[in-house]
Amino acid sequence: MNLLTGDLMLLLLDERTGHSLTDSTRTPRVLAGAVLLDLIDAGAVRLTGPGDAAKPGRIVVSANRSADPILGDALARIEVAGPMKARAAIEKLSKGLQPKVLHRLADEGLVRVEHHRVLGVFPRTAWVPSGYREELRDRLTPPFAHPDLSVEPRAAALISLLSAADAAPKVFPDRDRRVVRQRAKEIAAGDWAAKAAREAVQAVDAALTAAVVLSAAATGSA
């Protein structure tokens, strides 16, 4: 699975438990951000600008199409919905995304599926990542070990998404949490991608903030 989305899902899986390191609010939305970055990288979507019929700064479908099933489904959703802000696209693409990505990784042998029961009653599925997750993590380590090193765009995109979900310290538990969190934020704020890609990551931040606030409000009123 040569998608940013697949790499991000692997990084978000706990090697011991096979469960996500982030909660059910963060995981699908940050994955949706990765899908949006994959679509932008493939030239399948773009941001509107002067001369377009839609208002500037909206995500619209380009001429290119993707043969990848996950990206194809995401592209179809955007096409049906019409021009929208990146944050709205994140919410739309997040629906039902995580299971699709996990099953794809399982089909490709990148995760091992284990079924068990919590307290002997409630069924739960674990998605234990293969050794490829460690390889991914090792590739992302140099910017944290050597802050002066330049960060290649794909690594910067992954680290930026981990930062948006506040997951970087969990992915690199052997390093100082505050240092990792700060360095990830610096990388996310850097000039590592075109405007559309940076706006997609910012949209993940905004979507997560709104979702967490709504969840807290709902809990408080219950």
Image (tube, helix red, strand yellow):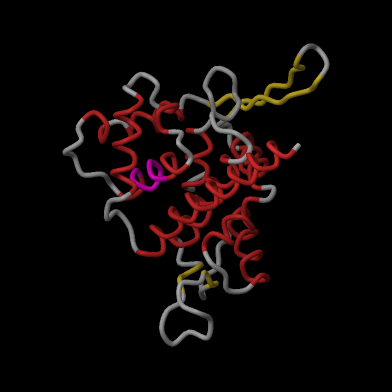
In the picture as drawn, the residue positioned furthest to the right comes out as 121
Magenta stretch bounds: 155-160
Q: In the displayed structure, would residue 173 be above or below residue 165?
A: above
Q: Main secondary structure of the magenta part?
A: helix
Q: In the displayed structure, would residue 33 be above or below residue 45?
A: above
- Quadrant of the snapshot with the C terminus: top right
In the shown orientation, is residue 78 left or right of residue 115?
left
Residue 159, x across and y down, in percent: 38, 41
The image quarter in which residue 106 lies: top right
In the shown orientation, is residue 115 left or right of residue 42?
right
Residue 150, x across and y down, in percent: 20, 44
Residue visible at 45% across and 62% down in the picture = 40
Any magenta on residue 143?
no
In the shown orientation, is residue 141 left or right of residue 215?
left
Residue visible at 60% across and 26% down in the picture = 19
Residue 141, x across and y down, in percent: 31, 30
Q: In the displayed structure, would residue 169 be above or below residue 84?
A: above
